[in-house]
Image (tube, rainbow, N blue to C red):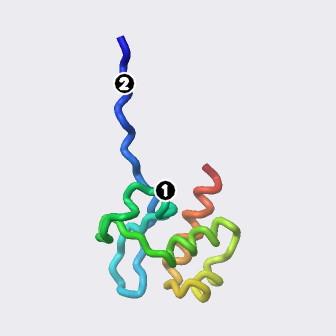
Amino acid sequence: MHHTLPARQHTCPRVALALHDGIERAYRLDDPGTCPHSGTANTIVSAYEPRVHLAYLLARQGHHADWLVRFADLPPAAAHRLTRAARHSAAC
């Protein structure tokens, strides 16, 4: 008898951020080409913003939050959360 394992539900890595509109959303951090949710509309539950993705990648390469604020035009609190997320992903 052949048993099939149930398909794992994909959960995109995300971080809760409030950008310049002041609304906190869970921004997806996956590459939009590899995430099965990349074509979905942005909601408060799950959003994709290219600046957030870029800032996350740059934070993973060692860029500091203060630099990300200037380079990616992010609020300071958002840049600090992204750098923490990037440090955490490097430790996994």
Q: Quadrant of the N terminus?
A: top left
Q: Is residue 65 above or below residue 61?
A: below
Q: Is residue 22 above or below residue 83?
A: below
Asked where in the image residue 17 lies, by quadrant, the reply is: bottom left
Q: Position of residue 41 (x, y in %)?
A: 30, 69
Do labels 1 and 2 touch, CB within 8 Å?
A: no
Label 2: element kind: loop
Q: Earlier in the sequence, mark 1 or mark 2?
A: 2
Residue positioned most to the right: 62
User: How busy is the neighbourhood of tag 1: few (under 14 within 10 Å), some, or many (20 plus)?
Assistant: few
Q: Name the residue carrying label 2.
A: 4
Q: Residue at x 38, y 67 (%)?
A: 26
User: How busy is the neighbourhood of tag 2: few (under 14 within 10 Å), some, or many (20 plus)?
Assistant: few
Residue positioned most to the top: 1
Q: Residue at x 49, y 75 (%)?
A: 50
Q: Position of residue 20 (x, y in %)?
A: 41, 87
Q: Residue at x 40, y 63 (%)?
A: 38
Q: Position of residue 74 (x, y in %)?
A: 51, 84
Residue type at mark 1: give it: Thr
All told, the count of numbered labels is 2
Q: Name the residue carrying label 1.
A: 34
Label 1: element kind: loop
Q: Nearer the viewer, residue 47 or 81?
A: 47
Q: Residue at x 37, y 36 (%)?
A: 7
Asked where in the image residue 72 lies, by quadrant, the reply is: bottom right
What label does residue 92 carry, if any?
Answer: none
Residue type at mark 2: give it: Thr
Q: Nearer the viewer, residue 37 or 77?
A: 37
Q: CA distance from mark 1 to mark 2?
A: 24 Å
Q: Position of residue 18 (x, y in %)?
A: 40, 78
